Every structure is written in structure tokens, then in C-alpha cells.
Amino acid sequence: MDSFPSSEPLRPVTQSEIASFASDGVVYLPNIVEKNWIELLNSSLELMLKDSKMFADLTALSSDLNKTQGLAAITENESKAGRFLSGVDHWKEDKNFAAFAKISPLPSIVAKLMNSKTVYLYEDSVLIKEPCTAEETAFHQDLGYFHLKGENVCTVWAPLDHVDSETGSVVYLRSSHKNKKVFKPNWFVVNEPLPDVEGNDLPNIEIDDKKLDLVRFDTKPGDLVVHHALTLHGAGANSSAARERRAVSVRYCGDDSTYIIRPGAPKKPHHENMRTGDPVIDHPDCPLVWG
Ligand SMILES: O=C(O)CCC(=O)C(=O)O
């Protein structure tokens, strides 16, 4: 029988944090998750990284996309320096990732922030920027990637390392969730929509645009940043020569969420059996984790 760290947060979510999430579409929650949870993710990730098939190399993708579009390609030297790696749905294979997504403090924190009686797990993602990774995470909005509709959809971003602007903190356009528009999902490393997707064209946002109300946080293991699925966000390159920047995002939906099959967005096997308008209910591939 596995034993896991506590499901209780280290401290309660405050009223002011709930208000920030509602008004800004993002909230920084320092010192809220026991470090033992992060240690478990670290140990699983170390093993997973031995199997390169588990991760997409977004640095290679960026280079290919830039070549096909005739854009200035990242130079050979830059592309050799560090890679932006990403993986998805590790909770389905790994018991530590499953426990973090399902029985860690995350579901209760999300229920509080969204004021939702129920919380369902949509997916997890691993986002690694090795030292000297030139690629930024292009500004995007999560909802367009998800076959979901509803007010109560969010992402919890959990850093496994100290992350700051040198190593690629995530940058959020404050209150952009209030616009309610769903934007076309992009390739994550360039602001080019995925093929055949629907929605509004994404605005071209630069990570350091001083004219915009962009917010970012210096974070450490045990902190969380939670953003609404409509909030526009991107992330910087990792310009540090020595520091790794690894994070796990866990994505949830809550009360009144329904499926909407979005053409062109990445599908999971169970989406083949869902119809637009079907309510999200407990399902092995989208399990109820709170309520
Ligand atoms: O960590 C990153 O680079 C991007 C994270 C992100 O966009 C997300 O988890 O939705």
C-alpha cells in the first residue's frame, strides 16, 4: 500500500487569494504544498526522462516550424544549447503523478478558488526548459486546447525548481479571462495556430511588453500558480547557463462543465465517445477528484 504526503494544504487559501483569482484570472499561492509532494514528482520525472519517447522536443518542433515558415530559425548553436521538453497525461502511467493530481491538496485548492462543489481532472503536463533554452512559450490560452466549455476550468502550475525571469517564469495578461473570447490554440513555441482549429485569432503578445498589464511570479517548489483557462499567458526562455526550469501543470474543470468537441484540438481517446453538450461526469479518463 503506497503512502503519500498529506492531502491538506500547508495553509488555507485566503479570501484575498480567492478574490485575486476571480479578478486577475491568476493567483500566486506561496508555501501551500508540502515539499514531499514535489520530491515524489522529482523522483518519477527522473525515471521518465530516461525514456525520450515520453516527451515532445518543442525545441526541435520550433526549429522545424520556423524553417517551413521561412522565419528566422533558431541558430544551430542555440538549438543545441538546451531543449524545451513537454509531456502530457503522466498521471495515467505514474502513481506519483496520479496521486499529485488526485489526492494532493490541489483538488481542494481548486475547489476553493473556483467556488466549485466538484472538481474533475482533465490532464497533466510536464514543462521542462533545460539550461540555455532559447524557446519562449508563445502566448496562448488553455481553453482552446481543451474539449471543454464552462466557467470553471483552470490550470495549476507547480514549479519543481526555483523559477524566475532568468529561467522562464510564466507571464500572465492580468484579467484577460474577463474577455470571454476563446482563441485558437497555437503550436506553443510559435504564435501560429494549429491546423484546422476554430476560434478567434490570438493577439501577438511579447513577453516583456511594458504597455500591457503582465504579471509574473518568482516561485519555488511548494508554491503554486493557478490560472483560469481563459487567461492569456506565455513564458520566457531559460537564459541561465546552469539552472534547470521544470514544472508540472495540472488541469481541472468543475461544476457545470460540458464537453465541446473543438476541431483541430488534441483529442484523448475518450473524447471520441463524447458529444458537444454532454455534461462532464466522473469517467476513468476525466475522474472526479473532489466533491
Ligand atoms: O511552463 C510553461 O512554459 C507554460 C505553462 C503553460 O502555458 C500552461 O501550463 O498552461
Image (cartoon, grey):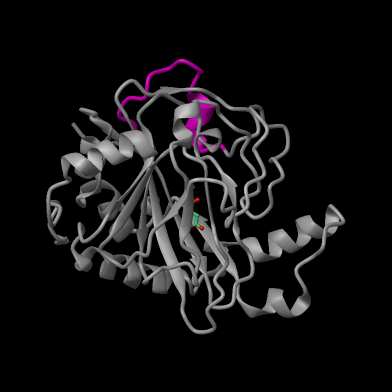
Residue depicted at 23% across the width and 36% down the height = 111
What number of labels is visible?
A: 0
Give me the residue at 33% from left, 57% from top: 97
At x 41% / y 24%, what residue is drawn?
150
Say whether residue 280 is magenta: yes
Residue closer to the observer: 69 or 103: 69
Q: On the rendered structure, is 186 left or right of 252?
A: right
Question: How far across and how far down the image is residue 22, in percent?
Answer: 32, 34
Quadrant the N terminus occupies: bottom left
Specify the segment rendered in magenta.
267-283
User: Residue reaching furthest bottom?
Assistant: 242
The image position of residue 117, as x and y in percent, is 20, 27
What residue is at 25 percent from the left and 48 percent from the top? 106
Q: Main secondary structure of the magenta part?
A: loop
Task: Name the side, left or right, on which 252 lies relative to 14.
Answer: right
Give the image quarter of residue 186: top right
Is 203 on the left or on the right of 232, as rendered?
right
Rendered-image quadrant of the C terminus: top left
Direction right: furthest residue: 70
